[in-house]
Image (cartoon, rainbow, N blue to C red):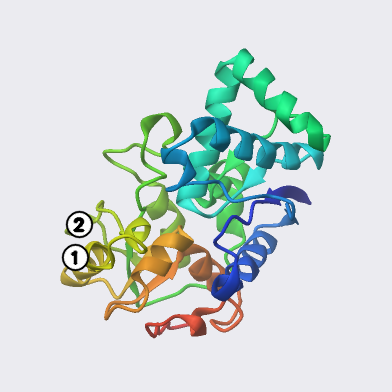
Amino acid sequence: MKKIGIYPGCCFQGADVHNYDITVRFLENMGVEGILLDRAACCGGGVIDETNKLVVYGLNARNIALAEEKGVDLYTPCNTCYMIIAKTKLALDADPELKEKINKILADEGLEYKGEAKIYHTLNLIRDFVGLDEYKKRIKRQISGVKVAPYYGCHVLAPNEVALDDVDNPTILKEILEPLGVEVIEGYKNENTCCGYHATYTDKDQKERLSIKPLEGAKEAGADIVATPCPLCHKAMDGMEEPILQVTQLINVACGMSPEETAINLNKTEVKLSI
């Protein structure tokens, strides 16, 4: 069985601890053993990243080094964590002096950033680590009669150097959703706008204005559910009139799990699936 390091970040904490169960079950359904990187720290996205790059590089070189210590690649379902960690890897791999500087700091903990571990998000984990053909083989049942609008969120399509798909014409979510038996609704209004999560603690009114736009656009286009790979996007948009799920929740159901087993019952907005 393949193994991968699960980077928990902040998405699996407190009231969101069920996201860890969703993630572990998703990996199991993909035939992958998840190894929790239990000493990992916050990536600093949206806070430290904007004020001190060196600290962010140190934090995330350490996170990657923890995966390398266990001999595994690093996987996070969070868009923001993916972007910040992937940018750190790019920066250190391109700058030997920066890498040496960071490693002098990590040496105090007996760690070393080698640059060997790859960084995975749900999208490229399915496409490149599991493989789309193997992914399709693992689907056990179809989720029929449901129209689903894919919502990527910001940080897997930008910036370009860490984007996981064509920024102007992404297709990977459609490729992941269609084998589940759902009807995919693309091209809806505000499909590529921000969910507003990072304004949650600074401007709640702005966050609410941003969160509702993709949901309303999807509803107008005829979608029953919006599906996002990102737990933060899900958290920002759940609770509105229009329902939203994490893509991994839909995948888990299509792999034979009940909605309760993949925490769909914990959604603020009720989601009904025909299975």
Mark 2 or mark 1: whose residue is earlier in sequence: 2
In the shown orientation, is residue 25 left or right of residue 179? right
Q: Residue at x 55, y 30 (%)?
A: 54
Return the residue at label 1.
217
Where residue 245 sits, quadrant-wise, is: bottom left
In the shown orientation, is residue 33 left or right of residue 266? right
Q: Residue furthest right?
A: 110
Return the residue at label 2.
190
Q: What number is the disc on residue 136?
A: none
Dot 2: within a 10 Å radius of its alpha carbon, few (fewer than 14), some, or many (20 or more) residues?
some
> Where 65 sits versus 146, above or below?
above
> Where 5 sits versus 139, above or below?
above
Dot 1: within a 10 Å radius of its alpha carbon, few (fewer than 14), some, or many (20 or more) residues?
some
Q: Residue at x 66, y 26 (%)?
A: 102
Q: Residue at x 70, y 62 (%)?
A: 28
**Is disc 2 placed on a helix, strand or loop?**
loop
In the shown orientation, is residue 6 left or right of residue 15? right
**221 and 140: which is toward the camera:** 221
Q: Please report contact status of discs 2 and 1: CB closer than 8 Å, yes or no.
A: yes
> Where 121 sits versus 238, above or below?
above
Tag 2: amino acid: Asn
Tag 1: amino acid: Gly
**Is disc 1 placed on a helix, strand or loop?**
helix
Residue 146 in picture, x, y percent from top left: 35, 75
